[in-house]
């Protein structure tokens, strides 16, 4: 598929699970790498739950000057316009439980001051559009458009900081195409908040920035 191949070449995208796939969360154990306050003493019980996070339409998007506006799909295509033409991307649902949409997986480690240990953290954001859905209907190995952030790769970084008492903080993903920020709170059960982006390149002439939407993921699925 031309669109997916283009994404793979330009953004170093990798394969990802289909939406809603569930796997075991693993054995009971304390979350590693965090100490003090709300981030201490949480037990990750053995259960079958999704390890994927969701990014969906924000309840109320507050636009700053120059922000990409429009629907969730418009803003998703604006983010991806750092390397992919919008017309090469199909429709993307803003709903958390739809067949198309935006999902993410990753691992986040913090030090004793709440700083993100970038070298030990990873994140992949996957965009599942209607083109992917059509192919997935007959090919279960079909891939979405994946933005993979791995600090072991040249030009990529993961950073940020969280307040160990309140859980409030920011996770920052950077590469040659721009920056994506997960601004939110790590609570007892979930890591949730807003996803914002600032591109540094564009294939459409205008470098995009703005708010993609809300995000949520089970705390034990990402803080490891």
Image (spheres, rainbow, N blue to C red):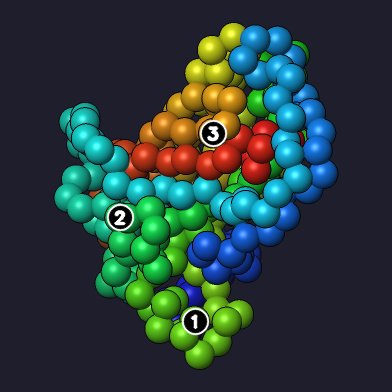
Of labels 2 and 3, the one closer to you = 3
Q: Is 52 placed left or right of 122 in the picture?
A: left
Between discs 2 and 1, the one toward the N terminus: 2
Badge 3 crowding class, 10 Å Cα cut-off, few under 14, some 14 to 19, many 20 or more, is: some
Q: Residue at x 50, y 59 (%)?
A: 126
| 15 w.r.t. 223: above or below | below
* Residue closer to the observer: 155 or 219: 219
Across and down, in percent, residue 136 comes to 49, 81
Visible residue check, residue 19:
yes
Visible residue check, residue 84:
no
* Contact between labelled residues 1 and 3, with CB atoms less than 8 Å apart: no
Badge 1 crowding class, 10 Å Cα cut-off, few under 14, some 14 to 19, many 20 or more, is: some
Across and down, in percent, residue 50 comes to 59, 53
- Give the CA distance from mark 2 to mark 3: 20 Å
Which numbered dot is residue 94? 2
Badge 2 crowding class, 10 Å Cα cut-off, few under 14, some 14 to 19, many 20 or more, is: many
* Residue closer to the observer: 120 or 164: 164
Residue ID for mark 1: 136
Residue ID for mark 3: 190
Element assignment for label 2: loop
Q: Residue at x 55, y 68 (%)?
A: 18
- Give the CA distance from mark 3 to mark 1: 29 Å
| 210 w.r.t. 31: above or below | below
């Amino acid at each position: 598929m031309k669109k997916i191949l283009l994404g793979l070449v330009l953004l170093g995208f990798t394969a990802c699970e289909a939406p809603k796939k569930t796997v075991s969360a693993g054995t009971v154990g304390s979350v590693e790498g965090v100490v003090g306050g709300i981030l201490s003493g949480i037990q990750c019980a053995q259960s079958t739950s999704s390890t994927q996070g969701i990014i969906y339409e924000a309840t109320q998007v507050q636009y700053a000057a120059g922000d990409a506006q429009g629907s969730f799909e418009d803003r998703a295509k604006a983010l991806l316009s750092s390397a992919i033409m919008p017309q090469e991307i199909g429709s993307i649902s803003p709903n958390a439980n739809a067949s198309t949409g935006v999902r993410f997986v990753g691992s986040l480690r913090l030090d004793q001051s709440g700083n993100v240990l970038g070298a030990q953290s990873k994140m992949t954001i996957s965009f599942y559009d209607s083109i992917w859905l059509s192919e997935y209907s007959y090919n279960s190995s079909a891939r979405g458009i994946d933005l993979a952030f791995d600090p072991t790769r040249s030009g990529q970084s993961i950073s940020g900081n969280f307040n160990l008492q309140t859980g409030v903080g920011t996770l920052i993903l950077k590469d040659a195409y721009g920056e994506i920020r997960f601004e939110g709170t790590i609570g007892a059960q979930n890591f949730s908040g807003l996803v914002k982006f600032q591109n540094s390149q564009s294939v459409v002439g205008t470098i995009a920035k703005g708010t993609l939407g809300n995000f949520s993921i089970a705390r034990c699925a990402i803080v490891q």
